[in-house]
Amino acid sequence: MHQLYYLARGLDLGEQKIRDPEHHNPAATTIAEAWLRPVLLALAQSNLLRSNELSQLFSALEQWRSQASIIQVAGDGSIQVDLFADHPLRKTDQEPSGEHVLTISTDSLA
């Protein structure tokens, strides 16, 4: 999933609007927002949730994902995602180390 998003960013498609018939909200969303939804779900330690809680959270993230953002400078409470690695997300205040490492701010969700 991360590598597909990396390719979309490389082709300048990250902010392109798309429509997903599976969404409850019929408004178009960006590819970046669509990628952020499962990333935010991973932050919630979804393995500890019951299936109905997981479903409710995934539905809520359809709205909440627009409040998270990909930022250039790391800060308190930011999360880094390495688009080339298959390891868990990590909280950090360090600067990203390469164009394949993205920093996500969830400050407005707190």
Image: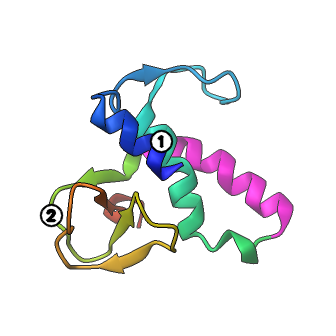
> Which class describes the residues within 10 Å of circle 2: few (<14), some (14-19), or many (20+)?
some
Specify the label residue 73 is tagged with: 2
Q: Do labels 1 and 2 touch, CB within 8 Å?
A: no
For the residue labelled by badge 1, is the local secondary structure a helix, a strand or a loop?
helix
- Name above or below for residue 90 compared with residue 84: below
Residue 97 appears in which quarter of the rendering?
bottom left
Residue 107 appears in which quarter of the rendering?
bottom left
* Residue drawn 73% across the image and 73% down it: 47
Q: How many marks?
A: 2
Give the foreground label among 1 and 2. 1
* Residue drawn 38% across the image and 64% down it: 81
Residue 9: x %, y % from top left: 32, 37
Residue 34: x %, y % from top left: 51, 39
- Name above or below for residue 61 compared with residue 22: below
Residue type beneath disc 1: Leu
For the residue labelled by badge 2, is the local secondary structure a helix, a strand or a loop?
loop
Residue 77 appears in which quarter of the rendering?
bottom left
> Which class describes the residues within 10 Å of circle 1: few (<14), some (14-19), or many (20+)?
few
Which residue in the protein does label 1 denote?
A: 4
Residue 58: x %, y % from top left: 67, 51
Q: CA distance from mark 1 to mark 2?
A: 23 Å
Lower sequence index among marks 1 and 2: 1
Looking at the rendering, the stretch of residues picked out in magenta corresponds to 50-65
